[in-house]
Image (cartoon, grey):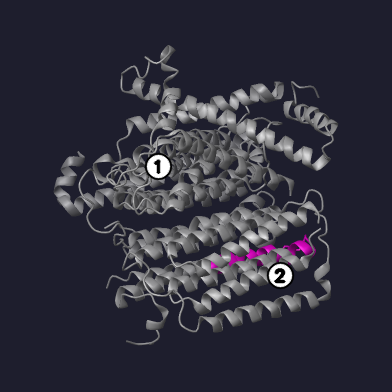
Amino acid sequence: MNEWLYVLLFIVVGLIIPVGAIGVAWIISPKKPNPIKSETYECGIETVGDSWVQFKAQYYIFALVFLVFDVEAVFLFPWAVKLGQLGLYAVIEGIIFILILVAGLVYTWRKGMLEWA
Amino acid sequence: MTAEQIVFLIVALVTLGSAFMVVTTRNLIHAALWLVATLFGVAVVYALLNAGFLAVVQVVVYIGAIAILFIFAVMLTRKDARDSGPQTHKNWWVGALLAVASYLGLSALVLGWSGSSKAAAGLPSGFDAVGQLGEALTSPNAYVLPFEVASVLLLAALVGAVYVAFNRK
Amino acid sequence: MVPLSWYLILSAGLFSIGLFGVLTRRNAVAILLGVELMLNSVNVNLAAFWRYGDVTQMAGQVFAIIVFAVAAAEVAVGLALVISVYRKRNTVIADDIDLMKW
Amino acid sequence: MNFWNDPLKTAADWLMGVFTGWGMNEVAAQVLIAFLGVLLLITLLMVLDIFLVWIERKVVARFQDRLGPNRVGPFGLIQPFADIVKLLIKEDFTPGGADKVVYNIAPMLSMMSVLILWAIVPLAPVILSVDLNVGLLYLIAAGAIGTLSIIMAGWASNNKFALIGAFRQVAVMVSFEVPMLATLLIPTILSGSMGLNGIVQAQNTWFVFIAPLAALIFLIAAIAELGRAPFDLSEGESELVSGYNIEYAGMKFGMFYAGELLHAFTFGGFWAILFFGGYRFFGLEQVSPFLAVAVMVFKAMIGYWIIMWIKYTMMRIRIDHMLAFNWKFLTPVAFVLLMVVALANALLAGTPTWLYVSGMFLSNVLVAWAAMEVARTVSRREREKVEGPKAVAEAHH
């Protein structure tokens, strides 16, 4: 438990520094709000339409493929740690594991989903 | 009330509080951000259970990938800017009743169970959870089959999701 | 010293909050958020039983990691379904999507 | 066991004596000492961060054959402090319709995600904050929090450009994390441990000689993860103004800017730890921990200099080329390299070190050559499809 206590301390101090800096800036900096100033910045021209703009589907595909390879990497880390002690059979298991998922990537590539079009 | 119990209670309250916010906030992006807070709380619970690998994997997989997928999905399925209309259907109280009933039933079951007041055994010295996990996942007489089937499951999920969502005929 | 029952009650609480979310929310994505909470409570149970049982038996942690993979697969396909329904019916409200064929 | 060969231990014991003298109980004293240690490390980092601002501007100037700041104080050393005072006193307003809470949390999260990275950095055999045995995944977890802060910043500032800039930046960061995960597995295989201190201890021969291609792919993925140099589409002034941090001014923008610089320096350090032996320099680290810290910081500075060098020579790549480069070239090569390294490591396990190192080096060169060959034939076939075979054949001779 105590190693995670240090990590918790790092998170606490890691939050204190930015909160402190922004707090000091908030106290010191002048506050003269007016509607013009709080306009969203559109290079000077009037904002057109709402900011929840419709989205391209590509974002979802990249997040999806990343999720699958992320979970794969999580499975592979314990395998990689123990690879030195285990024999050749563990390497073959890992390679089969990776090949199955690279096949998924090839499928997404062939379906043309990886283009940014 | 030892220090460890106080820490556990704080973490449990934060996790359950943000979980409750996930299911009750109107704005879906806020719900996704509250989900991130809940997942972080659960990661701290794993750290309390000395399951360091699970805590880090929870942050990497859930907060790093699944929460981002949720936010992207909410962005993609957003027709109007504001979430109009009530977020819960008319007879939401039936759902609330069922949830409370299940909670009471489960906790009664847990408290009734004899082994539930067991103390946590100390970790054997030099216990390397990740190494043990690596051996368990790859040794033929342990969990090598679920290890390989998990990759087939992920492949099926990837192919299925790509086919369903973006099939350009 | 935290007894095992506290962890189980925490995961029961998380499970029932997720159940409440699934049963009452109208938006399909919000229902998936509720399912995500329920999967997390299962994971907390697995980790607690691993820690309070024989620590050298890695069954608890292996199951927890498999639940990670299942949760990831479930979210991927679930959200893909919701997005493709949104493309055709322009709605994600669960009540409108109750016909198998339209 | 005096101060010079184990500074942290002696300082901690001395402080423990002082605190228990004041009547604090054991556990509270230990937590307070840990808190002071972390506070010391992070204040040192913030001072270093201010210095990095100066280094970055001076090095940029030298690359572009100009002087850089030299008016304010000797060699312009006071310039970063002037910048900080400006950031502090600049009026900072939140745009209309912005989501106040999320808008304010984003810069804090982005700075925190960089500071917590230093929890696992082994500065010397005895000076290291936390020896997590899941160090590498902790590194990716901190990256995940950084990605989340960018989404929150982009979404909360209620600005079309910020939203699109944030989501493009996240799409690039998320895509390049896949080859980074694959190349992080390689030092784990070679050293048999995920903890960064274990990796450094296992590097009798630096891993860059055993897996050079992995070092290269990790550098490319790290630069994309930082959102710098050829992959910094969010700063594309022509198209997206300045991406997710358009609506931020004053100290909040300062947090994003300082966080990005420190993040680049930290990844320079991780590149040194994973592939260039961390604080090891032919046994120098046994002499004294302070020398080891000096070696570690020196290597991190070289890594940071290389990242800056790439930043100020390469031009920005278009987003579809960037993503195509990642998914169609870098990810397949990274996973093929992972399989080859795992296989070669198992086959060459028992051999003497010189055979082991040359065998692994050769396997990496082989993978690199094969990847370039495949890329060359594919691009030739693409060109033939476009220009027709005759023109390509002529151009070839």
Closer to the camera in the image, D378 or D3 = D3
Protein chain holding label 2: C
Protein chain holding label 1: D
Residue B50 in view in this figure = no
Please tell me whether residue D68 is drawn above or below residue C18 in the rendered image. Answer: above
Displayed quadrant of residue B136: bottom right
Residue shown at the point (32%, 52%) measured from the top left: D164
Residue B62 horizontal/vertical position (percent): 54, 60
Q: Quadrant of the N terminus of chain D?
A: top right
Instruction: Please name the amino acid that badge 2 sits on.
Output: Ile
What residue is pinned by disc 2? C9
Q: Are dots 2 and 1 in contact, CB under 8 Å?
A: no
Query: Is residue D59 located in the magenta-colored stretch of the structure?
Result: no
Q: How many marks?
A: 2
Q: Quadrant of the C terminus of chain D?
A: top left
Does residue D194 appear left or right of residue A2 in this picture?
left
Closer to the camera in the image, B20 or A82 = B20
Q: Write the start and end of the magenta stretch as one range.
A: C49-71
Instruction: Please name the amino acid that badge 1 sits on.
Output: Gly
* Secondary element type, mark 1: loop
* Secondary element type, mark 2: helix
Residue D222 in view in this figure = yes
Q: Nearer the viewer, mark 2 or mark 1?
A: 2
> Do the residues at pointers 2 and 1 share their chain?
no
Query: Is residue C63 located in the magenta-colored stretch of the structure?
Result: yes
Please tell me whether residue D87 is drawn above or below residue D242 in the rendered image. Answer: above
Q: Residues within 10 Å of mark 1 (few under 14, many from 20)?
A: many
Residue shown at the point (50%, 51%) measured from the top left: D144
Residue D120 horizontal/vertical position (percent): 62, 40
What residue is pinned by disc 1? D227
Q: Give the CA separation, mark 2 to mark 1.
A: 43 Å
